[in-house]
């Protein structure tokens, strides 16, 4: 999810990203932005640890970031600064899945955001696509006006199943309205 401003509060657009490996410049702008300055990005999903053992998660950011793993804040980098690497280490079980949420911001000039790891069997590398998955959660706000209903937000699922959203309207007495 890409936002205007530093606080992930003015939504611009969203996309599914296979990896998190960005260096933004005036000639390589963030998605949906007309400038490389004053934007923020929120990534949510899961990290899949295939093997048991010691894992280290690394972030390389210019300007700032908060990284949550399994709901716990593990890296808090307030920035602003040129690219700086931070890390957090974990001991994970084989085939374990861990939620991840990153909230990144860039202030002035170019921006960098890279999410990497080292695993029990590999050195430091960008976390591969096969080890980053989406959550089953939906982030949608329904706006119900006098004669219209609109949705703001997005819904992502990993599989290709078909989903049906049903909206029902009830009057003050609890009777379904056609």
Image (cartoon, rainbow, N blue to C red):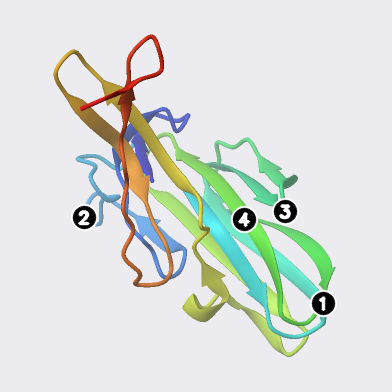
Real-space Cα separation, disc 4 to disc 3, in angstroms: 6 Å
Mark 1, other Cα within 10 Å: few <14 / some 14–19 / many ≥20: few
Relative horizontal placement of residue 65, taking residue 175 as reference (left or right): right
**Residue 155 or 49: which is nearer the viewer?**
155
Real-space Cα separation, disc 2 to disc 4, in angstroms: 29 Å
Disc 2 + disc 3, Cβ < 8 Å: no
Q: Which of marks 2 and 4 is nearer the N terminus?
A: 2
Residue 107 is situated, as x and y percent measured from the top left of the image, at 43, 34
Whether residue 45 is situated above or below residue 177 in the rendered picture: below
**Residue topped by disc 2:** 27
Residue 38 showing in the rendered view: no
**Residue topped by disc 3:** 70
**Residue 175 or 1: which is nearer the viewer?**
175
Whether residue 73 is situated above or below residue 18 in the rendered picture: above
**Residue topped by disc 4:** 100
Q: Count how many numbered circles sit on residues in the image.
A: 4
Q: What element carries label 1?
A: loop
Real-space Cα separation, disc 1 to disc 4, in angstroms: 16 Å
Residue ID at (45%, 54%)? 112
* Mark 1 or 2: the one toward you: 1
Residue ID at (48%, 76%)? 129
**Residue 94 or 111: which is nearer the viewer?**
94
Mark 3, other Cα within 10 Å: few <14 / some 14–19 / many ≥20: few
**Residue topped by disc 1:** 93
């Amino acid at each position: 999810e890409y936002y205007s401003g530093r606080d992930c509060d003015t939504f611009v657009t969203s996309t599914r990203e296979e990896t998190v490996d960005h260096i933004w410049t005036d000639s390589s702008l963030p998605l949906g932005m007309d400038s490389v300055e004053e934007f923020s990005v929120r990534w949510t999903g899961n990290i899949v640890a295939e093997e048991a053992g010691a894992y280290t998660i690394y972030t390389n950011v210019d300007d700032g970031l908060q990284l949550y793993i399994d709901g716990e804040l593990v890296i808090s980098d307030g920035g602003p600064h040129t690219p700086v690497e931070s890390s957090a280490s974990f001991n994970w079980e084989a085939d374990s899945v861990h939620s991840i949420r990153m909230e990144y911001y860039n202030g002035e000039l170019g921006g960098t955001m890279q999410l990497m790891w080292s695993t029990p069997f590999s050195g430091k590398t960008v976390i591969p696509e096969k080890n980053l998955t989406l959550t089953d959660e939906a982030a949608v706000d329904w706006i119900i006006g006098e004669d219209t209903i609109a949705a703001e937000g997005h819904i992502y699922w990993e599989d290709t199943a078909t989903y049906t959203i049903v909206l029902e309207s009830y009057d003050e007495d609890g009777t379904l309205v056609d």
